[in-house]
Amino acid sequence: ANKKAALISFAYNVGAFNKASGFNTISTVLDNKQYDKVKSALLLYVKSNGVTSQGLINRRTDEANLFNT
């Protein structure tokens, strides 16, 4: 349930992402069930208009922690 909730949170914020352009890393990690790599994959998506956002870092970290519980 936590894995699903984390991915719903991510998708709610970025839109449909599975196999979409720009989301190759997270799509590949999930497709290959490499769950130990989800956190590092999520942390690739922390920029808004090309600028790293601490708020997005916090959100992705929370999503990754939820995914891994």
Image (tube, rainbow, N blue to C red):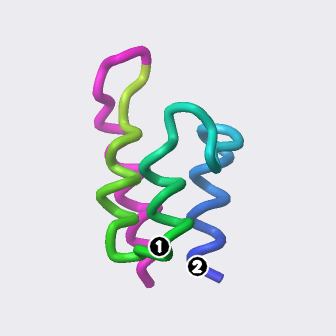
Magenta span dominant secondary structure: helix
The label number, if any, that marks residue 56 in the structure image:
none
- The picture places residue 58, in percent across and down from the top left corner, at 34, 49
What are the residue bounds of the magenta stretch?
49-69
| Residue furthest top as drawn | 49
Does 61 sit left or right of 30 as displayed? Answer: left
Circle 2 residue: 2
Residue 63: say if magenta. Answer: yes
Does 30 sit left or right of 1 as displayed? Answer: left
The residue type indicated by label 2 comes to: Asn
- Mark earlier in primary sequence (2, 1): 2
- The picture places residue 6, in percent across and down from the top left corner, at 56, 65
Which structural element holds mark 2?
A: helix
Residue 17: say if magenta. Answer: no
**In the picture, which quadrant includes the C terminus?**
bottom left
Task: Mark 2 and mark 1 in contact? Answer it, CB < 8 Å.
Answer: yes
